[in-house]
Image (cartoon, rainbow, N blue to C red):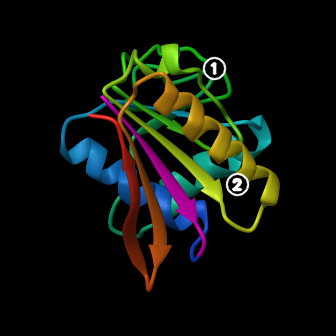
Amino acid sequence: MEVRFYHLTQSPLEHTLPGLLAKSLERGWRVVVQGGDAARLRVLDTHLWTYADDSFLPHGLEGQGAEQPIWLTTSEDNPNNAGVLMLIDGARATPDRMKGFDLVTLFFNGADEAAVAQARADWKAATEAGLPAVYWAQENGGWVQKAKAGA
């Protein structure tokens, strides 16, 4: 199990999330994307169907399509038996909940001071609970590992 923190500084979530979801599907993983705002999830729902002309990401939005490999929700439910939890837009999970997944990713906007402060608090909670955590930051169009804690 691992918790990954993704510090968004150069591209928005809409550009980052589809690629990571596609990689998850390639690996045969099921994913819950938990967001903090239902309206924002509806926007992401549309985006995931249309982000690329030559592909789509099969997914369902809370209240529909829970059998899909990607499920978008504001709740803590896991109806598609996902092994991956992606937390976006201020959604949070306790370390005990994180332990129920093989991989947890937490995305936060580097331009939002409150989001950065919350990510720091979540890092502290995860590492104090003994969870292995990795902090990634966007640099020069790619991801650079900045910190690692735990096993």
Give the labeled residue for mark 1.
63
Q: Is residue 93 magenta?
A: no
The percent position of residue 144, horizontal first and vertical second, equals 38, 70
Q: Amino acid at mark 1?
A: Gly
Q: Where's residue 49, x and y in %?
A: 49, 53
| Relative side of 38 to 136, left or right | right
Q: Which residues are magenta?
A: 1-9
Q: How far from the left and from the top, in percent, is residue 65?
A: 49, 24
**In the image: residue 24, left or right of residue 38:** left
Residue type pointed to by label 2: Val
Q: Which residue is label 2 attached to?
A: 116
Residue 68 vertical placement versus 53 (above, below): above
- Local crowd size for mark 1, using a 10 Å CA cut-off: few (<14), some (14–19), many (≥20): few
Tell me the residue at 81%/51% (across/down). 114
- 111 horizontally vs 47: left or right: right
Q: Quadrant of residue 82?
A: top left
